Image: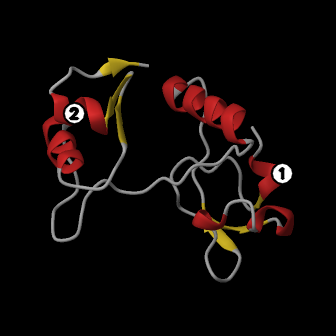
Amino acid sequence: DRASEIFDGPLPSPYMLFVHDVAEAWRDRIPAVVHVDGTARIQTVDPAKEPLVARMLGEFERLTGLPVVVNTSLNTAGRPMVDDPRDALECFGSSPVDLLAIGPYAVRRGDFFRGADARST
C-alpha cells in the first residue's frame, strides 16, 4: 500500500518483472534493495492473496519504520534453490541465517540447534 510513495513504475507489480526508480528520499533508508543506478526490482503484495506476507510486512514496518523487505531466492552458493520445507531446514542449518519462516511458523537459530519444534508466530 506504500509502493507508490517509494517506487516509480507500473503498480501493482506482483511478479518482480519490472525495474522501478526508487524515490530519492528512500534510497538511503532501504539500501539493500537499491541497485547502483537507483532502481529496484520490486514485488508488491496483495493482502487478499497473500495475507501472511502482508501481515509480516505490516509488523516489520511497525518495528522498524520500513515497509520494505528484501525478497530473494533461498539457497546458498553451489546449492540449488530450496524446493520444500525439508530443503529449507537443511539450508537454514548450514547457513548464517537467524530465522526461517515457513508459512505461519518461525524457526530461530537457537531453537533449531536445541532440537525444539518450530514456534508459531
Residue visible at 17% across and 61% down?
A: 80
Q: Is residue 59 above or below residue 45?
A: above
Q: Which residue is mark 1?
A: 5
Residue 120 in the image: x percent, y percent?
Answer: 37, 16
At label 2, counting other C-alpha atoms closer than 10 Å, the crowd grade (few under 14, some 14-19, many 20 or more) is some
Residue 58 in the image: x percent, y percent?
Answer: 66, 30
45 and 52: which one is in front?
Answer: 52
Residue 88 in the image: x percent, y percent?
Answer: 22, 43
Residue visible at 25% across and 58% down?
A: 75
79 and 112: which one is in front?
Answer: 112
Which numbered disc flags the more N-terminal residue, 2 or 1?
Answer: 1
Quarter of the figure that contains the C terminus: top left
82 and 114: which one is in front?
Answer: 114
At label 1, counting other C-alpha atoms closer than 10 Å, the crowd grade (few under 14, some 14-19, many 20 or more) is few
Mark nearest the camera among 2 and 1 is: 2
Q: Amino acid at mark 1?
A: Glu
Residue extending farthest top: 120
Residue 33's tag is none
Snapshot quadrant of residue 41: bottom right
Residue visible at 65% across and 67% down?
A: 31
Q: Secondary structure at mark 2?
A: helix
Q: Which residue is mark 2?
A: 112
Labels 2 and 1 touching (C-beta < 8 A): no
Quarter of the figure that contains the N terminus: top right
Q: Amino acid at mark 2?
A: Phe
112 and 54: which one is in front?
Answer: 112
Q: Is residue 6 above or below residue 117?
A: below
Is residue 108 left or right of 79 when viewed as pictured? Answer: right
Q: CA distance from mark 2 to mark 1?
A: 38 Å
Snapshot quadrant of residue 60: top right
Residue 106 in the image: x percent, y percent?
Answer: 36, 28
